[in-house]
Image (tube, rainbow, N blue to C red):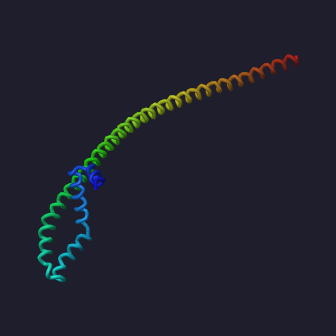
Amino acid sequence: MIKLFTKFKKFSLREINRKVAVNATLIFGTMGAVYLFFMWSLLPIIFPDIQVVVLYISSCVIQLVALPLIMVGSSILSEKAEQRAQDDHIRLIAAFNELKDLQIHADEQRTHMIDAIGQLTELQHHADEERKSLLEINNNELKELLALKELHKDIHKLLKGTTTKKVKK
């Protein structure tokens, strides 16, 4: 008995009342309780002598004790539900703020990427211009080389022609 008392001493009277109210609400809120009360209401039909006892228990105990107990249990359960809703709200706000920060970071990254693409496009444009100018330079040098080659052929022909004339003389 002392062990049982020390075990309950860990809980305050308020905690014990809350547990009783919640458990009673959960028990009375089952279909088993409905069937039990239905059977209770049929007892005077089977045993007419106990009608007074059944009516007393129904009107006094069930209505005057159980209904307020159920209301207290419902109130406690709704407090728990409200606390869960508040906790969920806080977590959702935190998740929303985190997502908002991620969106800001993604927008900044997208801006940096757009800037980088613009710089790459500009570099590509400069590289294309440089390639065109190098091609023009190469084409001009190639034309000059071809002209020099033609000039060299012409000089070679001229020299060959003058040496053949000297040999003939």
Q: Residue at x 77, y 21 (%)?
A: 156
Quadrant of the image for the N terminus?
bottom left
Please indicate whether residue 168 sits to the left or right of residue 33 in the image: right
Q: Residue furthest front?
A: 2
Of residue 121 and residue 44, the one placed in the foreground of this image is: 44
Residue 119 at x, y percent in the picture: 46, 31
- Percent of width and height locating residue 110: 40, 37
Q: Position of residue 146 (x, y in %)?
A: 68, 26
Quadrant housing the C terminus: top right
Q: Is residue 106 above or below residue 74?
A: above
Quarter-wise, where is residue 39 in the image? bottom left
Q: Quadrant of residue 72?
A: bottom left
Determine whether 125 is above or below 59 in the image. Answer: above
Which residue: 23% across, 66% down?
Answer: 28
Residue 65 versus residue 115 in the image, above or below: below
Foreground pick, 82 / 27: 27
User: Number of marks in the image?
Assistant: 0
The residue positioned 15% from the left and 78% from the top of the image is: 50
Whether residue 45 sits left or right of residue 136 in the image: it is: left
From the viewer's side, name the closer residue of 3 and 112.
3
**Residue at 28% across, 47% down:** 87
Q: Is residue 35 left or right of residue 112?
A: left
Whole-percent x and y of residue 160? 81, 21
Q: Nearer the viewer, residue 143 or 33?
A: 33
